Amino acid sequence: MTAETRRRAVQAARGEMPFDLLLTDTRIVDMVTGEIREADVGIVGSLIASVHPRGSRNDAHETHALHNQFLSPGLMDTHVHLESSHLMPARYAEIVLAQGTTAVFWDPHELANVLGIDGVRFAIEASRNLPLQVMVAAPSSVPSTPGLEMSGADFAGDEMNTLLGWPEVRGVAEVMDMHGVLNGSQRMLDIMQAGLDSGKLIEGHARGLSGADLQAYLAAGVTSDHELTSADDALEKLRAGLTLEIRGSHPYLLPDIVSALKTLPHLSSHITVCTDDVPPDILMEKGGIIALLNLLIEHGLAATDALRFATLNAAIRLQRNDLGLIAAGRRADLVVFDSLDKLTARQVYVAGKLIARDGATLEPVADTPLTLPRDTVRLSALTADDFCMRIGNANHGVARLRHICGARFTRWGETDVQVRNGCVQIPDGFSLIWVQHRHARHAAKPQIALLEGWGELRGAIATSYSHDSHNLVVMGRDPNDMALAANTLINSGGGMALAQQGDVIAHVAMPIAGMLSELPPAELALQFRTLRDRSSLIADWEPPYRVFKAIEGTCLACNAGPHLTDLGLTDGSTRQIVDPLISYRETPDNTQ
C-alpha cells in the first residue's frame, strides 16, 4: 500500500475525485454488527475508500452492479499445509481464490521436514507474487518428535531465530512436541523463546491436552489450537483462552462442536476456521474453507457467524488489521455470494481487481520461476525379502510381540506369532506396516511392525507423504506387492502407490520433495481420486477413523500411543522406542 494510494482514497472518500471502482447495489455482510445492510463500496487501487448509502455516489472510472447479492470480506484460512494439496502454490492459489479464499497462513513443515530451511525458503519464493495472500510460518516441528524419528532436518532455537528474522515469516507454526514443552526440553525452551522474543504468533497442536497439562501448554506461550477431538475438548480450550481453529479435515466432529458453541452466551472472536490438510480431489470437488463454512451452516450455525470466523476473527488472529472487514482503509479483498443458505463465490476481488467469476479465475496465476527440489527419495531398489519381519536370530518358533492397534487413535496390543525360516507369519486379521528413512541422514535398517485394526490388506499401500517426517511408508501383507509399491515410488521420486497381485493398480507421482506434483490440478485430482477409489480394493474403510486419510498420519509419533517410525516402534506417551519382542521360544522344525 503506497502513500499515494491512501492519499487518493482519502480524496475519493470526500468526493474530491472519482473512485477507480464502484460496487453498487450490494448487501454487505457486516462482520462487526452481524447486520446485512444495503450499501455501495468505493475502491481506489487496492484499498476500500468508502462504504456509503446506495446510490449516493456514481463517480467512478468503472462500476460493477452486484444486483442485490451479498458482499463479504475475502475468506481466510488460519492454518494450512499447502503441501497436502500436492499442488504447486500457484495452482493451489487458482483453486482457492476462485472459491473465495484470499488469504492463508501456511505452515510448510512438510517441506521443511524434507528440505530443512531451504524448504521454508522455497515456500516463500513460490508464493511471493501470488494474488493469494500467503503468510508463511516458521515450522517448529522438524521433526515433530526428536529422538523417536528422523526427518531431513533438525530445527531448534538457532534455526527458529533465523526464520523468525525473515520479514515474510509471520510466526511459529504448530508446536507439536507437546511432551517437550511440558517437560522443559532445551530444544523446545529455545524454540518457544525465539517465538516469544519475535513478538509473532505461536500456533499450537494441543491434541489430547486437558486440565493441568493444557494450562501448562498455554503458560509456555502457545495461543491457538486446531487439534480438536470433541465438543468438550473445543469448549475447554476456548475457555482456557486458546484461539480455536475449527478445521474441515475432520468433519465428523462439526455437528457436536456447532451444538456446543450455540450454548455459549456469545461467539468469541477467538473462534476461527482452517483446512489443515485438503487433498487435491477434495479441494476441487468440494472446496477448502468454503466447504467447511457450508458444513457449519448445514449443522445450524448462522451464516453471518460462520463468515465472521473466516474473516474478521481470522484477521484478528493473524494480526492483519488490513483484512477481514468491508470498511474504509481495509484492503479490497472481497467475495460476492448470491445466497447465504449455501455459499458459492460468484465473484472474487483481490486488491480491488476482479480476479474470479463463477468458480474460475479470469486469468491463470503465473508461476514463479524456481529450481524444483527433486530426487529426495534416496533409496535403492527393494526386494520382497526386505518386507520379511525378523526377530533377531529367531528362525523357527513362537514369539509374543507388541503391536499397534487402531487407526487415528492407537493403543498397544500383544499377540503370539509363528516364526518360520526367520520370518514372522502374519496372523489372521493383521497386516504389516514398514518404514524406511529416505533422507540419507542415517543408515538404519527398515522398521516393521504388526498392525491390527486395519484388517487384512489385500495388496499394498505405499506413500512418501507421511506426517511429519515423510519417510517411505508401506502397509500390506504380501511382500511382493509391498516391494512393488515401494519401488514404484522410489522410481518416481515419491508420491503414493497401490499394488495388488503383482500389478500397480494406482499411482500418483510426486517428484517435487516427494510430495508435490507439476500436473495441472484437474489431472492431479483425477489421479488422486482414482487412487482413493481403488484403495478400497485393498482396504475395508470404516469411518470415522479407519479412512483413506489415516494413511498419511499413521506414523505421527508426537501423538499418544504406539506408532512406527524410521527409528522403531515408538510410544508417543512415554517418548520411548519400544522393543516389540516380549518373549520367544524356539521350537523344532517339525512342530508347531
Image (tube, rainbow, N blue to C red):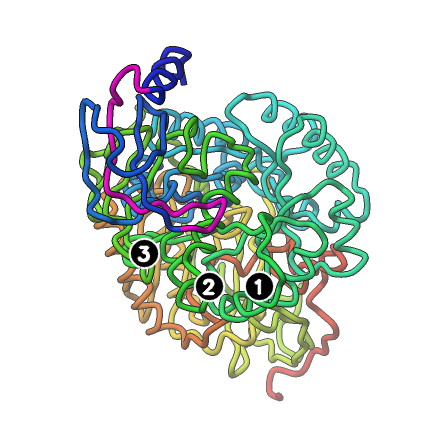
Q: From the top left corner, tell me how far across and down residue 373 is, in percent.
A: 40, 32
Instruction: Tell whether 47 sits left or right of 395.
Output: left
Q: Mark 1 sits on what residue?
A: 261
Residue 229 appears in view: yes
Q: At numbered mark 1, what does the secondary structure look like: helix, strand or loop?
A: helix
- Quarter containing the C terminus: bottom right
- What is the residue that sits farthest to the bottom in this orientation? 591
Could you tell which of marks 1 and 3 lies nearer the N-terminus? 1
- Would residue 28 be counted in the magenta stretch? yes
Relative to 377, residue 246 above or below: below
Please name the residue that numbered disc 3 is placed on: 343
Instruction: Count the numbered circles shown.
Output: 3
Residue labelled with disc 2: 301
Q: Which quarter of the picture shows residue 174?
A: top right
Type of amino acid under label 1: Leu
The quarter of the picture where the N terminus appears is: top left
500 magenta-colored: no
Residues in magenta, as a range: 15-35
Please give the name of the residue rendered at 52% of the width and 64% of the height, measured from the top-left corner: 433
Q: Quadrant of residue 405?
A: bottom right
Mark 1: give few (<14), some (14-19) or many (20+) Cα within 10 Å. Answer: some
User: What amino acid type should be assigned to the residue bearing mark 2?
Assistant: Leu
Where in the figure is residue 96, as x and y percent of width and height?
Answer: 33, 44
Question: Label 3's element?
Answer: loop
